[in-house]
Image (cartoon, grey):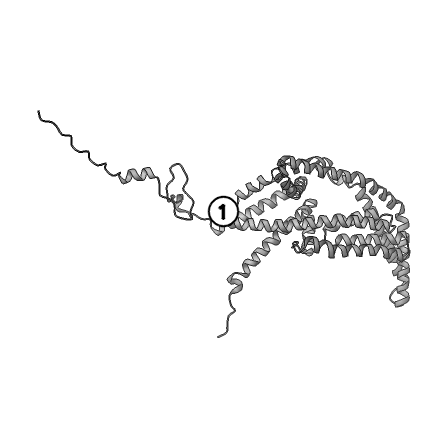
Amino acid sequence: MSRMVAPPPSPPSPPRPEAADRKAGPPPPPAGQAAPARGGARWPPAPPAGGGPRTATPRQRLGLVLGLLGALLFGVWLFQSILTPFVLAGVIAYFLDPPATRLARLGVPRGLAALLLVLALVLFALLCLLLLWPLVIAQIGVLVASLPAYIARVGAALRDALLRIEEAVGPAYMDTQLRELAVNQVGAMLAWLGTAATRLLGGGVALFNVFTLVVVTPIVAFYLLRDWPRILARIESWLPRRSANTIRQLARDTDRVLSAWLRGQLLCCTGLGVYYAVGLSLAGLELGLMVGLLSGILTFIPYVGSTTGLVLATLLSIGQFGTWQEVAVVVAVFVAGQIVEGYIIYPYLLGDRVELHAVWVIFALFAGGVAFGFLGVLLAVPMAATIGVVARYWLRRYLESPLYLDPPRTGT
């Protein structure tokens, strides 16, 4: 029986192209494009159903922007009666975010840092209220008791000034009836201002809901401050990818301008309020504390706080002293305060980082107050800073565009 020889083994056959493709998976996407999704997605992706465009049209982008703005304005208008504590809590969280971030970098948990900062702010506010409120109430009593004498002295001083003017220009331009009319009108205005000030300061707490400001605002501020980085990250994840870098840059510019303005106004309001209260009290003005604190609080409106404080202090000093030497001392206190604000606080502490013009801020504050009351005043400066940053961005775009750079037409 012959021996059977086994045939030599055949070489392995090369893999079929279909099997290799199934094993290797889909080819990589072109450079600069995102990888296809897992789970059987193919490349290139299938066109959208209905043959529509893959990218958003300018009309869709404009509709998104206008829709968001319209929804925001409608929400503010609809809920303006309850939004004040939430907006105030947002302002507190925005202001306390830098120290909370520093504490978190030092190893303090973000929640504990937020709790400590909010509690410190609440305790400071309560301390100021307990220390200053009795003094303010006492000065209101002094104002109520001394207001008739103040009005009489101011009227006498005004009558003497008008007599000197009459002697200088002659009776043809200034007669007795006109002089008495001016004196009576000034007295009526002072009486109205005094009554309004006493009602405002005496019933100021009634203007706000005590439960809302004392309880709701600190609680909402704590939660916002604790979750501030996550809130910003979530909002950033919702930005349209096409314009995300531009929106981030605009947000950083707005934050820089707004934080500089808030820091500057806090320094000015605190420093000038303390300076005016101490200076006017040392000058002998009975209501110096109340006028100084009012001037410091109103300093966040450019030129309004100092002007209001100067007029009130001058009238009160005329009513109290009746001589121009003491009035000159009171005026000198305000002049020195304006020099400190204009030549020390802003140039050396803030530099050129505050890019909000005084007229723009005044208009924004009054427009916000007319539109939404106290809520509008809280929202006015952030909106003004945002609009200013966006306006400067579009101005730069315009100055770099052919609309501005195209050469003028030459005549033939």
**Quadrant position of residue 226:** top right
Q: For this view, does 192 lie left or right of residue 210?
A: right
169 shown above or below 99: below
The image shows residue 218 at horizontal and vertical percentages of: 68, 37
Q: Which residue is mark 1?
A: 241
* Between 5 and 195, the one nearer to me in the picture: 5
* Residue drawn at x 56%, y 56% as measured from the top left: 394
Quarter of the N terminus within the rendering: top left
**Residue, far bottom:** 412
76 shown above or below 7: below
* Residue drawn at x 39%, y 46% as measured from the top left: 51
**Quadrant position of residue 141:** top right
* Residue drawn at x 54%, y 60% as measured from the top left: 398
Mark 1: secondary structure = helix
Q: For this view, does 165 lie left or right of residue 110?
A: right
Asked whether the viewer can see residue 291, the reply is no
313 shown above or below 16: below
